[in-house]
Structure formats: C-alpha cells, structure tokens
Image (tube, rainbow, N blue to C red):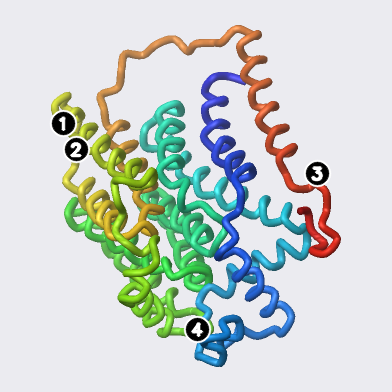
Amino acid sequence: MSFSRLWAFLAIALPVLAAIIAPFPSVDLTYHLRAGSLILDTGAIPSVDTFTFTAAGSPWLDQQWLAQVAMAAAFRVAGWTGLVVLRAILVGIAFGLLFDLCRRRAASVRVAAWLTLAAFVCAAITLGLRPQLFGIALFAGVLWLVARRHDAPGAAWLVVPLVIAWANVHGSFVLGPAVVGLALVEDLVRRDRRWRATAVLLLGSVVATVVSPFGIRNWTYVTGISTNSVITKRITEWQPTSPLTVEGALFFLSIALVAAFLVAASRRGRRVPPTAFLWLVPFAAVGVWAVRGLAWWPFVAAATVAAIAGGAPAPAARPERVEPTIVRRLNAAIAVVLVLAGIAALPLWRPRDPGLQAPA
C-alpha cells in the first residue's frame, strides 16, 4: 500500500474507528429508540406525547420519525452492534464524501486527509447517534453534489431526494436549500451563465423540504424549536458556543487557523475569492450561535481551504516516488490493524444482557 493510499484510508478509517469505540450518550438515544419502536409496532407516526407524564396527550410533531425508525430497526436486527455499525456507516459516509471533495479540490491526497481529520476533530462532539447524525451525512452529500454541480449537472439533481430524506430525519434540513442558495449567489457573483440551473435546483430543494407527512409544518417545527426561549436558555446545546469548553475552544481555534491560512495564502499570491467568505461566514455564525451549530462549520471550512490550496501554482514536476516494498507492506499492516481493531471493538463480542436481548 502506497503512502497516498494509506492517507486516503486513514482519512475515513480513523473517524469510523472512533465512531465504533466512542460510548453512546443515552439521553436522546433511548427516547428515539422507543419512538422508532412504537412506529414499527403501530405502523403510524405518533401524534401525541405518550412518554412525558407531565405532558401526556399533548400534540407531538415527530419530524424525526424516519431516523427513529432506522435506529429502532438497527437495534432490533443486531442490538447494540447494529447501532454501533449504523453510527460508523453514517460517520464514514460524511467524512468519506468530505475527503473526496477535498481531494478533488486540493489535488493532494495528503492535504485532503489532513483537512478531513481536522474537520472530524472539530465535529466530534456532534457525532453521537441521534437524528442529527443522519443530517450531517446528508449535509455532506448535498455539499459534495452542489460543489460539483457544473461538472456533473445531472448528478446535482440527487440533491432533491437527499433533501426529501433529510426533511424526515432532522430539523437541520433547512441547510439543504441554504447550501444550494449559497451556490446560486456564488454563480451570480462569478457571473456564471449556468446560474439558472442552480436556481431551478434551489426551487426543487425548497419543494423537497415539505415532502413529508407534515408538509409545510416541517418549517413551523424548526422555527418553533429554534426560537423557543425556554429551549435556548435552559438547554446547553442550544446556547451560544463558549470558548471555555473543549468543543468551543476547538471551534474558535479552527476559525483562527482558517483566517490565518487565508491571510498567508493571499500574501503568497494565491487567489482568495470573495465567495470563500460567502461560505465561511454564515456557517461560522451558526457555530457561534449555538453548540448544535458546530456540526456544519468543519465541513464547509475544510472544503473551502482545500479549494484555495488547490488553486496554488503547480510545483515543478517531480518523478513519481515509489516506496520500498517493506514500506508498502508496513502501510498495509497499519490498515489491517485498524480494521481488526474496529472489528474487535464491536459490542458483538461482549456478554449479553438476557433482559435486553442485546449486548450489554
């Protein structure tokens, strides 16, 4: 295995391995498993609260129903192992797509791998198994498709079914049309004649957000949650991001590093397009606004930095380096060890709790 392939492997394998090893926070997970199980048993999405004794019978708009069904189905099929594998798959999809986007833009596998792993570190706090993780994977998919909208215009229309799925798994679906909208502004700023196709795609993505059992109420749900003063004042993840926390410190440090990179790139003669700020500023603002918003900035920042790094003057051509056989074998051994570590870390090998019919 060459160093190039090893870097590509590490960019995806390390986040996946971390997703397998990291413990599950149970606060949201158990609630979503119960809701998904209820939907599977009854064949209907619950419309009233039956879980909270202080609010039993109150109307409930379960916008995240599809993610709950997926989690409950995974648990029924393979217990905790199923949930671990599900999280690993979602994390692998998200950072696999980010790596591919960075690789295409930076034209360097190693740089793309570094950016992907840096994004993973910044986003790690948001990668618990909950509906938002489905949204993160879909966000990465939409970002990947939109970034290649002019290279593969037909494939860009996959944004619409992705947003439809997104509108049924998590309230962050609003970011789907937002990404397409930013792409449209980018086309207009660049005076790209293909802006009309992006405008039609934006319209399609907006319509896709109401393709759910709740229709337009998806939007009232999102606005109601995000503007509810009780939620924003009392729930930590809905409060502004503090630099005094680990995740907040990483977030603000990443902003500083991106800013420093932009300054350095400009001084070295690299072109820093104004549209870079079109992407960076809104997602940085979302991250500052609330801890929940930390999930999106790392993806946009990595992709933007990769694009600017890829715009540097090409270095003088060098003969392709061929690693010695022993080095290639060592690289392959590292990959095998990581794969075996992931398999060994699965709950499948742990003692089973007969009461839960799942690994303890």
Q: Earlier in the sequence, mark 3 or mark 1?
A: 1
Q: Disc 3 and disc 2: Cα gap in Å? A: 51 Å
Give the quadrant of residue 293.
Answer: bottom left
Where in the figure is residue 284, as x and y percent of width and height? Answer: 27, 51
Q: Label 1's element?
A: helix
Q: Label 4's element?
A: loop
Q: Disc 4 and disc 3: Cα gap in Å? A: 38 Å
Where in the figure is residue 317, as x and y percent of width and height? Answer: 36, 14
Q: Amino acid at mark 3?
A: Trp
Q: Amino acid at mark 1?
A: Ser
Where in the figure is residue 17, as x and y percent of width and height? Answer: 61, 39
Q: Amino acid at mark 4?
A: Leu
Dots 4, 1 in contact, CB < 8 A = no
Q: Disc 3 and disc 1: Cα gap in Å? A: 53 Å
Q: Label 1: few (<14), some or many (≥20) within 10 Å?
A: some
Q: Earlier in the sequence, mark 1 or mark 2?
A: 1
Q: Which residue is mark 2?
A: 272
Q: Residue at x 56, y 64 (%)?
A: 27
Residue depth check, mark 3 versus mark 2: number of the one nearer the observer: 3
Q: Disc 1 and disc 2: Cα gap in Å? A: 6 Å
Q: Earlier in the sequence, mark 4 or mark 1?
A: 4
Dots 4, 3 in contact, CB < 8 A = no
Residue depth check, mark 2 versus mark 4: number of the one nearer the observer: 4
Q: Label 3's element?
A: helix
For this rendering, which residue is in front, 61 or 305? 61
Label at residue 61: 4
Q: Which residue is mark 1?
A: 266
Q: Amino acid at mark 2?
A: Val
Q: Label 2's element?
A: loop
Dots 1, 2 in contact, CB < 8 A = yes
Q: Is residue 198 shown left or right of residue 43?
A: left
